[in-house]
Amino acid sequence: MALKPEVKLLLEQLEQSGTSPTHELSPEEARNGIAIEELAGERVEIESVVNRALDTNVGEVPVRIYTPVKSEEALPVFVYYHGGGWVIGNLDSVDIPCRQIASESQCVVVSVDYRLAPENKFPAAIDDSYAVIEWLIDHEKELNIDASRIAVGGDSAGGNIAAVVSLKARDLDVNNIIQQVLVYPVTDYNLKTSSYLDYADGYFLTKDTMQWFWNHYLNSDSDGESPYVSPLKATNLKDLPPALVITAEYDPLRDEGEAYAKKLQEANIPVQLKRYDGVIHGFFWMAGLLEEGADAIKLVSSTLSKAFENTTKDSLI
């Protein structure tokens, strides 16, 4: 399918803006770049949005907690990890999608402000992200959440983190995670797939930028062999939570996301794979511009609702 006209116009505007490519910037400069939330659409009002610092076993981890409604019953929880190549991105960049998901799926959303590279290289982001899961399990009454119904998700590098957190929980025999949502996830330290070759430049996320992200995130190339960096390299994907995997047609990460979905299926994990044609990496937080972004958020919300409805309090722990 051809690029959507709205996407083509956006790419032309970005090119004409004269903004330096991300890979030519310092991390600090890149963090002060495009205000992506301007493309996210309208902010949904919900019961409460609270910033907290959770006192975890790896130190304080900032989070933003979205509660959709007052409820006497404990609500399920969706832990969300923002994208940005482990180097950029923050809680504000995914605020609008998190509000929408909390409202549509009637769950508490916990958005995690994990430590960023290069100041904090692998495994800092993973340590923070998994520590939040442990904290939620230990403090479910405090937040009025049902810690037997935890879903994890994220976009891009956040999708990588969600996949890795699911692996780590499985490895540690923690079975509270009942669903993973992987939105155009990074799954492999490998920049040689067909989608990398076809969409290396000119489609928002570039190959050079991904290499820049990897260089900042990893301590060395050998880190890339770890399944906690490259879940596609994991030799055992059995007993993982069901997965929703979303990809974009014009995205360097498309092939590795779809390869991970296939590998999960081969391990008999229930997988729903949805590719959105005509769009680029990042479309998930462009719901104010692209109907595909709005549709993807609805798909995530409906998937979470079904997963939470199909899980009872006593079925996991």
Image (tube, helix red, strand yellow):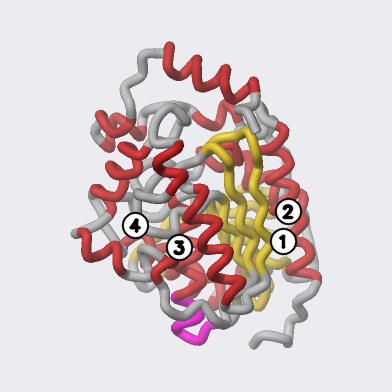
Q: Is residue 298 above or below residue 303?
A: above
| Magenta span contains residue 219 | no
Q: Secondary structure at mark 1?
A: helix
**Residue sitting at 73 percent across and 70 percent down?**
74
The quarter of the displayed image where residue 25 is located: top left
**Residue sitting at 51 percent across and 77 percent down?**
237
Q: Which of pointers 2 and 3 lies earlier in the amino acid sequence?
A: 3
As measured in the structure, the alpha-carbon distance from the residue carrying label 2 to the one carrying label 3 is: 25 Å
Q: Secondary structure at mark 3?
A: strand
Q: Which mark is nearer the camera, 2 or 3? A: 2
**Residue bounds of the magenta highlight:** 168-174
Q: Is residue 215 above or below residue 209?
A: below
Q: Which of pointers 1 and 3 lies earlier in the amino acid sequence?
A: 3
The percent position of residue 289, horizontal first and vertical second, equals 65, 26
- Of the pair 149 and 284, the residue shown nearer to us: 284
Q: Mark 4 — residue? A: 189
Is 97 on the left-hand or right-hand side of 225?
right
As measured in the structure, the alpha-carbon distance from the residue carrying label 3 to the one carrying label 4 is: 31 Å
Q: Is residue 199 above or below residue 15?
A: below
Q: Which of pointers 2 and 4 lies earlier in the amino acid sequence?
A: 4
Q: Mark 1 — residue? A: 304
As measured in the structure, the alpha-carbon distance from the residue carrying label 4 to the one carrying label 1 is: 29 Å
Q: Which of pointers 4 and 1 lies earlier in the amino acid sequence?
A: 4
As measured in the structure, the alpha-carbon distance from the residue carrying label 1 to the one carrying label 3 is: 24 Å
Q: What amino acid is at disc 2?
A: Ser
Q: Which mark is nearer the camera, 4 or 1? A: 4
